[in-house]
Amino acid sequence: MSQSQSNDLGSQPKSFLQSYLIKQNIRTIQMDGTTYYVAKDVARSFGYADASLRNAINLHCVNRKRVHIKYKSAPIPTTVINLTDLCMFALRCRLKPSEDLRYWILNKVIERFQSQSA
């Protein structure tokens, strides 16, 4: 697993997302050419307590996948989410730690798409 991977949102958004992932210690994994984010890491970075992680992930992430990641020679079952679910999770979460990513999604990415379509 790596600490950050690329996405399809262009150079400026990519650098924000990469630095956000590193800052928040969100692990990523590449599968079939797609970057997935460890759901537990995302939920923790948004401020969810350990007791409510699974419930928050199930509530906010519709495309979650269960994979086995080899760790110290033993496969560990891990839930991962794609970029769409990462954004949906951030937009649905109302906890303060998710504000930076929510702001980036709503203001920078949407603004960029609007300017490209104009």
Image: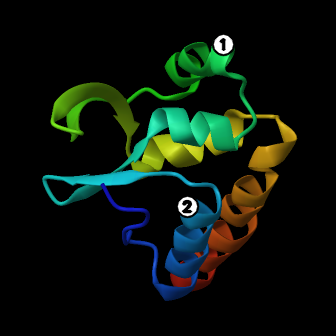
| Residue 28 pos. (x, y %) | 37, 53
Residue 48 position by quadrant: top right
Of 79 and 116, the residue lying toward us: 79
Is there any visible trace of residue 118 in the rendered image? no
Of 38 and 114, the residue lying toward us: 38
Mark 2 crowdedness (10 Å alpha carbons): few <14, some 14-19, many ≥20? many
Mark 1 crowdedness (10 Å alpha carbons): few <14, some 14-19, many ≥20? few
| Residue 67 pos. (x, y %) | 23, 30
- Residue extending farthest right: 96
Tag 1: amino acid: Ala
Q: How many marks?
A: 2
Residue 60 vs 38, above or below: the answer is above
Q: State which quarter of the image contains the C terminus.
A: bottom right
Q: State which quarter of the image contains the N terminus.
A: bottom left
- Describe the element under mark 1 as helix, strand or loop: helix
| Residue 64 pos. (x, y %) | 37, 29
Residue that badge 2 annotates: 21
Tag 2: amino acid: Leu
Residue 24 position by quadrant: bottom right
| Residue 80 pos. (x, y %) | 36, 36
Determine whether, in the image, residue 22 is placed left or right of residue 62: right
Say which label, 1 or 2, has the lower sequence index.
2
At 58% across and 13% down in the image, what residue appears?
55
Check residue 65 in the rendering and tell me which mark sits there, or answer none: none
At 37% across and 68% down in the image, what residue appears?
5
At 86% across and 43% down in the image, what residue appears?
96
Check residue 51 in the rendering and tell me which mark sits there, or answer none: 1
- Describe the element under mark 2 as helix, strand or loop: helix
- Alpha carbon of mark 1 to alpha carbon of mark 2: how far? 22 Å
At 43% across and 26% down in the image, what residue appears?
62
* Coloring basis for residues: rainbow
